[in-house]
Image (cartoon, helix red, strand yellow):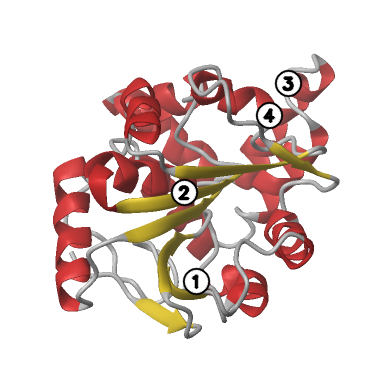
Amino acid sequence: MRLHYQTYGDGPRPILAFHGIGQDHRCFLPLVNALKKQYTFYLFDLPFHGKSPAMDTEKLSMAEWQDTIEVFLAENHLQTFSVLGFSMGGKFALATLQLFPNQIISCWLLAPDGITESPWYRLATRFWLTKKLFKFVVGNVEHFKKLAYPFLKLGLVEKSAVKFAQSTLATATQRERIYRSWVGFSTIQPDIPAVASIILKYKIDLKLFLGRFDAVLPASYVQPLIKRLPNSTPIILKTGHHRLIEKVAEWFVQNPPFTTQSP
C-alpha cells in the first residue's frame, strides 16, 4: 500500500504526521508554519482520505502498516524519525512507535485515538451483523439523529460529540469514508502496555496534548497510557477537539522545542 504524502519544512529532524478522520495532510499546516525551521514534516493522507487510494482489503493489518512505513523510510533514507498523530491519526502514530521502537526520537499525540477503544467502536466494527447495522445507521443520517437523541437525554454522550459526528456525515462521500475508515482501521490497535515500555526503554520524548473542552476524545481516554508513564504529564489547552492543532501550534511558538541554530 502506498500513501500520498507532502513534505514541508527544511529542518534537520524528520517527523511523520497522521491526521484525523475526515481530514487530510493540510490540517497540520499550522504546526508546519510554527516549526518548519526545526523539522521536516512528512504529512500523510491516510487511506480513503485526501489523495491516498482506498485499500484493497476490508481491514488494514499491523503487518501491512509496517510494510508501508518500511518502504517509505527506505525511499526517503530515514534511519530515525519522530511521529505525530491527531485524533484517529494517534493510533497510527502509536502503531508506528510500537513497530519501529529503536528508530523513534519523539512522539506527539494530540487528543489521540488508539489508547482506549470505545465499546461502541468495538461492537460496530468486529461482527458481520453489527457492521451491517453500523453501515445502515451511517448511511441514513436521520436514523442517526433519532438514535443519538436518547443518548443525549440520558447524558451518555456530549452534544458537541454528536455535532462532530453530524458534521463528518453530511454527504454521501463523507459517510462512505467514515464507514470504511472505522471498519478498515479497526485492526490498527497498538498494545498500550508495550508502547509504554518502549517509551521508557528508549527514552522517547512523549508530548501529549489534550483539549480541556474536548468531548470527542476526552482526557479519560489517555489514562491507560499515562498511568504507565508517571513522569509524563498531559499538556491541557483551552480548546475543544476541532481547534486543537491550531492551539498546539501556538503552544510551540511560546515553547519552542529547539532553537533554529541547535543541531
Badge 4: how crowded within 10 Å, few (<14), some, or many (20+)? some
- Of circles 3 and 4, the one toward us is 4
Can residue 228 be seen here? yes
Please name the residue shown 38% across and 62% down the image. Answer: 46
Task: Name the disc covering residue 147, or none.
Answer: none
Badge 2: how crowded within 10 Å, few (<14), some, or many (20+)? many
Where does the image place residue 83, in percent across and percent down from the top left?
42, 55
CA–CA distance in space, label 2 to label 3? 35 Å
Nearest the viewer among 37 and 131 is 37
- Of circles 4 and 1, the one toward us is 4
Task: Name the disc covering residue 219, or none.
Answer: 4
What kind of residue is marked 3?
Phe
Of marks 3 and 4, which one's residue comes earlier in the chain?
3
CA–CA distance in space, label 2 to label 1? 17 Å
What kind of residue is marked 4?
Ala
* Image-based side of 198 in relation to 215, left or right: left
Of marks 2 and 1, which one's residue comes earlier in the chain?
1
Of marks 4 and 1, which one's residue comes earlier in the chain?
1
Nearest the viewer among 87 and 84 is 84
> To which residue does mark 2 refer?
107
> To which residue does mark 3 refer?
151
Whether 81 is drawn above or below 233: the answer is below
Q: Secondary structure at mark 2?
A: strand
> To which residue does mark 1 refer?
25
* Image-based side of 80 in relation to 257, left or right: left
CA–CA distance in space, label 4 to label 1? 24 Å
